[in-house]
Image (cartoon, helix red, strand yellow):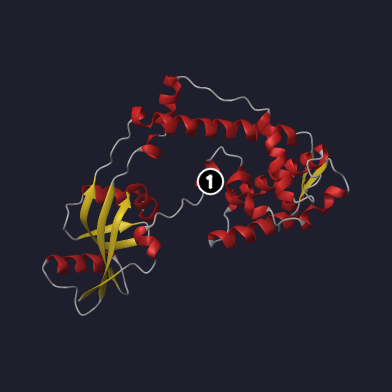
Amino acid sequence: MVSQTQPPNAAAASCSPLPSASWLREPLLHFLLIGALLFAIDRALLDRRDDPNTIVITAEVDAEAAQLFETARGRKPNADEVRALRQIWLDNEVLYREGLALGVDRGDSAIRERVIFKSLSLVDADLPVPEISDADLRAWFEARRDTYDTPARYDFEEAALRGERSEATIRDLVARLASGDEAGDGDAELRVFKGRPRANIVQSYGDDFAKALDAAAPGVWQAMQTRDGWRAMRVTAKSALTPASFEALRGPVLQDWRDARSAELRTAAVRKIASRYTIRNDADAAAP
């Protein structure tokens, strides 16, 4: 008999997991996104007392950042994320040193994050206020339409087979379900998924599975292949994608563009400041 349960991982059924590297593609200055992870990395900064114009990226920086990332995300960072975390640390260190050089630490007990914030405020004060024409804003919106559209969503169920999940065993299970057999004596359990957006389905199961859901008739059990193997699934409801209206969202879209453009300018300004420093990477040299 198919027993009904919620998926063992609640996030698998009702929450959209964060794309593992989506923050890497954002133009925002990295420390504004997850810089709090790196405020604890202070003992790796001792070299700054020897030469204020040389920044040394040590293996300790990478190790501390990876540990903090794992604590926050529940997994180790991949190679791209390690490089991004290193850049976050470097951006913060540049701003920290600039803040010390400008004396913004006075009266603040040299608290690292406050010095960085004050230094960034000075950078922001020199940035131009971005402007954009209506036509260019519309083009920017269209290029990011998937951010604003209401996505297609799906309700579906899985008869999760215990033990072997080969194509043959899944197809046999689907045939029994279709014939009214309730999947035998407790060899499968019913998992219910509600309101899953299509992008989340692609991330979790793969693009081919999402296309199969697009084509599936509601209420019909099917053997479907996912990136993790074969599964017995049936769609119970679908809601179509609803395109966003630029006219209705012009205000929020304009603010999003200003935020993104300001972040790009801010990042460029920090990297220009960083060019005045000698950056030495000892972390890669120490790697096995």
Q: How many marks?
A: 1
Query: What residue is shown at x 82% (from left), y 40% (from top)?
Result: 103
Left or right, 207 with respect to 219, comes to: right
Q: Which residue is the extreme one toward the left?
A: 179
Q: Residues within 10 Å of mark 1 (few under 14, many from 20)?
A: some
Q: Secondary structure at mark 1?
A: helix
Q: Which residue is mark 1?
A: 23
Q: Is residue 58 above or below residue 160?
A: above
Q: Position of residue 25 (x, y in %)?
A: 53, 41
The amino acid sitting under disc 1 is Trp
Q: Please tell me in which quadrant of the rendered image residue 244 appears.
A: top left
Q: Position of residue 146 (x, y in %)?
A: 38, 38
Query: What residue is shown at x 62% (from left), y 30% (from top)?
Result: 265
Q: Which residue is the extreme one toward the front?
A: 107
Q: Is residue 271 visible?
A: no
Q: Please tell me in which quadrant of the rendered image residue 52 appears.
A: top right
Q: Quadrant of the N terminus?
A: bottom left
Left or right, 84 with respect to 90, comes to: left
Q: Is residue 43 visible?
A: yes
Q: Is residue 143 above or below residue 59?
A: above
Query: What residue is shown at x 49% (from left), y 31% (from top)?
Result: 257
Q: Nearer the viewer, residue 155 or 80?
A: 155
Q: Position of residue 69 (x, y in %)?
A: 60, 57
Left or right, 163 with respect to 179, comes to: right
Q: Position of residue 198 (x, y in %)?
A: 32, 48
Left or right, 62 with respect to 172, comes to: right
Q: Which residue is the extreme one toward the right?
A: 50
Query: What residue is shown at x 38% (from left), y 57% (from top)?
Result: 15
Q: Quadrant of the C terminus?
A: bottom right
